[in-house]
Image (spheres, grey):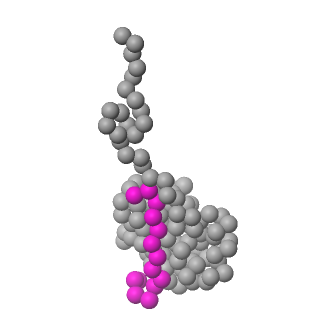
Amino acid sequence: MKSNAIHTIGRRKSSVARAYVKPGAGVITVNSKPFEVYFGRATLRMVVKQPLALLKQEEKFDVSLNVCGGGPSGQAGACRLAIARALIEVDAANRKSLKVEGYLTRDAREVERKKYGRHGARRRPQFSKR
């Protein structure tokens, strides 16, 4: 699968996804598991397929995804970015429609670190006058 396939990387939160895209029948595998098994929630499956659905190419490419780090939502977002980047390498004319929908934007939001003297990143201890 990985030879002569287009290889791209997508990131979201602390997740990293590597996508290998090649012409095929529309089979998507994630970490050597079927796509439907790995992403249990329908919303996560929809997020991953958004770039392919936008271009109406769901049945034209086989996609193999290798994902690590983070949780299910971050992994789905990373997969979406990696697939969108691969579709641009397939045909540069796809860039405009993917860019308008925001599928090429790297979401840079990360979890803010916990600070000392606080219960979380910003949460202060409860105030008491006495």
Question: Where in the figure is residue 97, as x and y percent of width and height?
Answer: 68, 71
Depicted 17 relative to depicted 14: above or below: below
Question: Where in the figure is residue 31, as x and y percent of width and height?
Answer: 37, 69
Residue placed at 46% from the left, 60% from the top?
A: 12
Question: Where in the figure is residue 84, as x and y percent of width and height?
Answer: 56, 72
Q: Does the magenta stretch include residue 92?
A: no
Q: Quadrant of the rendered structure where residue 99 is?
A: bottom right
Residue placed at 49% from the left, 79% from the top?
A: 21
Left or right relative to 21: residue 104: right
Residue placed at 42% from the left, 68% from the top?
A: 17
| Towards the viewer: 117 or 38 | 117
Q: Outermost residue toward the top?
A: 130
Q: Outermost residue toward the left?
A: 116
Residue placed at 39% from the left, 15% from the top?
A: 128
Q: Is residue 36 in view from this perspective?
A: no
Depicted 84 relative to depicted 74: above or below: below
Quarter of the picture containing the N terminus is bottom left
Depicted 61 relative to depicted 81: above or below: below
Q: Is residue 32 in view from this perspective?
A: yes
Q: Quadrant of the rendered structure where residue 93 is?
A: bottom right
Left or right relative to 68: residue 98: right
| Towards the viewer: 15 or 106 | 106
**Total number of numbered discs in the rendering:** 0
Give the residues drawn in magenta, as a range. Answer: 1-14
Q: Quadrant of the rendered structure where residue 120 is?
A: top left
Q: Is residue 9 magenta?
A: yes
Q: Outermost residue toward the bottom?
A: 4
Quarter of the picture containing the C terminus is top left
| Towards the viewer: 128 or 32 | 128
Question: Where in the figure is residue 90, as x and y percent of width and height?
Answer: 57, 83
